[in-house]
Amino acid sequence: MARSSLAPTAGLAPRRPWWRVSAWKRGEYLAAAVFIAPGLIWFLGFMLYPLVYSFWMSLHDWKIRGPSEFVGLANYVRVFGDSVNLIALRNTVVYGVLSVPTQMFLGLMIALGLERLSRGKVLLRLIYYLPVISSWVVVSLMFMFLFNSEGLFNHVFGDVLGLVDPNTAWLNRASTAIPVIALLGVWKGLGWSMLIYLAALQGIPAELTEAARVDGANRAQVTRYVTVPLLKPTTLFIAVMLTIGAFQSFIQFYIITGGGPVHQTEVFLSYMYDQAFNFLDFGYASAIAWLLAALILAISLVQFRLIKSTYEY
């Protein structure tokens, strides 16, 4: 006679229904729910709901008051036909190309230098990290005053040293304003890259570098053939995070140039902010945000594939 599939398996105790758990277990579940609930409510209410709602808005000609007309993908098509978005893409890519590799290289060099110091390491780490915790608004205003046509940079390098035209308006055109803002990004974020690399360096086993030295490798060869390859997971993490940060840059552009003149220094978030809060075109701004998220995701996946394919250990 065939045995019923619902019959308890020999040697195993039948599973108790969830509603017949002991009072002690119910207390455990209740405590877990109490701890999870605030974070879950925060995630659902302030992250997931706005995310889904912004996608819904991107499919409408959104009105603050009154009914909003459903327009399907028209806002997304409009993004590709808007020439300002091409300027924003160009400026964002130039900013990322100038700031991300520079910040990673200098962060690695400083971390390698600090790792070999026996004294003053903590003080130097603090000095390099101070810009990271500084306000974006404050440092953006500082760079704006440094590089305006009557600023300190023109006075020192123009009036005193004679290296540049002292009347140069660095922030009035994209070809000079983007490098200045990239310089600000490198200066402010350098301490973060340095700190991540420094933590990764402390995780490399000393036996590996000592074995390389025993084999006759000098300091530069140990760094190139042992330390840098072992730092590739850290390099991948920093590259992805800095690239995401570059594509999300907003405050420094908004304060220093405001996207002008005539949208020439616009980036995605400054243009999106302009469309949403100056022209109240929330549907179009939401479409820009979603396409920017898709672009960041695609670039991050490419970075993962490129760096993971070069792992050597």
Image (cartoon, helix red, strand yellow):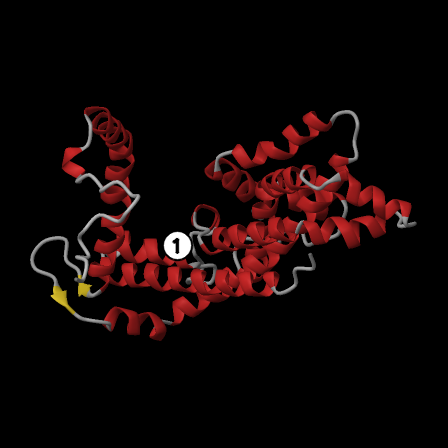
Which residue is at 51% across, 50% downward?
241
Q: Residue furthest right?
A: 216
The reply, left or right, for residue 266 in relation to residue 146 is left
Q: Position of residue 232 (x, y in %)?
A: 65, 53
* Residue closest to the eye, 62 or 263: 62
Is residue 20 found left or right of 110 in the rendered image? left
Could you tell me the amino acid type at mark 1?
Ser
* 161, 226: nearer the viewer: 226
Residue annotated with mark 1: 270
Residue at image coords 68%, 26%: 122
In the rendered image, which quarter contains the N terminus? bottom left
Locate the C terminus and report the quarter of the image it occupies.
Answer: bottom right
- Residue 115 pos. (x, y %): 74, 36
Secondary structure under badge 1?
helix
Q: Is residue 252 visible?
A: yes
Give 10 or 307, whichever is nearer the viewer: 10
Q: How many marks?
A: 1
Q: Residues within 10 Å of mark 1 (few under 14, many from 20)?
A: many
Q: Position of residue 24 (x, y in %)?
A: 23, 24
Q: Nearer the viewer, residue 33 or 186?
A: 33
**Position of 56 compared to 130: left or right?**
left
Above-or-below relation of 79 to 100? below
**Which residue is drawn at the image coordinates 68% and 54% (left, top)?**
165
- Residue 23 appears at what percent x and percent y? 19, 25
- Name which quarter of the figure residue 121 lies in: top right
- The extreme front residue here reads 1
Query: Which residue does the image show at 58% across and 46% down from the upper left?
Result: 184
